[in-house]
Amino acid sequence: MANDPLTTKKCKPCEGGVPPLTSEEVAGFMKETPEWEVDSSEKIIERSLTFRNFSDAMVFVNRVAEIAEEENHHPNILLHGYKHVTISLTTHAIDGLSENDFIVAAKIDKLI
């Protein structure tokens, strides 16, 4: 089960009490989400995209919102310059990255 693709997994509730992913674990998950970038603190993953226009960007943002609601794991979404979208994921309860962040990132990648 541990080697299942991230897109087949479901997020698990995280209320804290578990450590954030290690650098090695982050590196492993990045192999399935190579378009995402990890910040220098290894607490956030982020991806930026550019769409043809505002309408396409909003369709994408709304589809991301549907994934976030299904998984009960919500990214920060920034729409800027009318057609640019930046998405960042972190697990606030543990002040770092969890498998949930990578599950949502992989599912977002399937939209593109």
Image: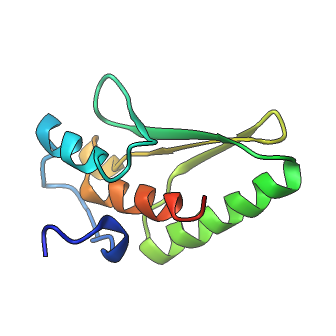
Q: Is residue 69 above or below residue 83?
A: below
Which residue is depicted at the point 47% across and 39% down?
Answer: 46
Q: Is residue 99 above or below residue 72?
A: above
Q: Is residue 8 above or below residue 53?
A: below
Which residue is depicted at the point 38% across and 49% down?
Answer: 33
Q: How far across and how far down the image is residue 97, in percent?
A: 28, 45
Q: Is residue 20 visible?
A: no
* Viewer-closest of 75 and 56: 56
* Viewer-closest of 84 and 70: 84
Q: How far across and how far down the image is residue 13, in percent?
A: 29, 70
Please say which color scheme the image uses. rainbow
Q: Is residue 99 left or right of residue 76?
A: left
Image quarter in which the C terminus is found: bottom right
Q: How far across and how far down the image is residue 48, in percent?
A: 59, 38
Which residue is depicted at the point 38% across and 37% down?
Answer: 44
Quadrant in the picture for residue 22? top left
Q: Is residue 101 visible?
A: yes
Which residue is depicted at the point 31% across and 66% down?
Answer: 6
